[in-house]
Image (spheres, rainbow, N blue to C red):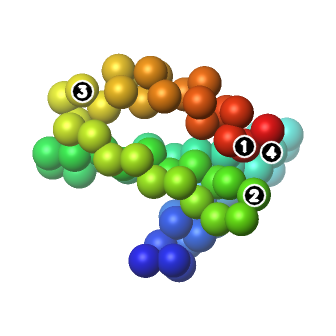
Amino acid sequence: MELGPLMVTGISERLSSPEGTGKVESVIINFQKDSVLLTKLERGFLAISADRVHALRTFEEVAQSIRELTD
């Protein structure tokens, strides 16, 4: 479980364009029924799961609180 978020964000960084995209801050993974938001924190990762139908709205609602944790 600890290596999963590190692998997902690492792969995402390797797949992104090397010209100025910067480091990955968060990744959303969509499954059939749920979505998971992975966000890098100073000492690890935060994972939030939501029903896929409501995931975008849920993640938008908690975005500011997450930004405060990462600043």
Which mark is nearer the camera, 1 or 3? 1
Which mark is nearer the camera, 1 or 4? 1
- Looking at the image, which is closer to me, 47 or 3? 47
The numbered mark at residue 1 is none
Residue drawn at point x = 43 percent, y = 77 percent: 1
Is residue 50 visible in the rendered structure shown here?
A: yes
Mark positioned earlier in the residue sequence (3 or 4): 4
Q: Amino acid at mark 4?
A: Gly
The numbered mark at residue 42 is 2
Secondary structure type for disc 2: loop
Residue drawn at point x = 85 percent, y = 40 percent: 20
| Circle 2 Cα neighbour tier, 10 Å, few/some/many (<14 / 14–19 / ≥20) | few
**Circles 1 and 4 in contact, beta carbons < 8 Å:** no
Residue drawn at point x = 52 percent, y = 66 percent: 5
Tell me the CA gap for discs 2 and 4. Answer: 16 Å
**Circles 1 and 2 in contact, beta carbons < 8 Å:** yes
Q: Amino acid at mark 1?
A: Thr
Tell me the CA gap for discs 1 and 2. Answer: 7 Å
Which mark is nearer the camera, 2 or 4? 2
The numbered mark at residue 70 is 1
Mark positioned earlier in the residue sequence (3 or 2): 2
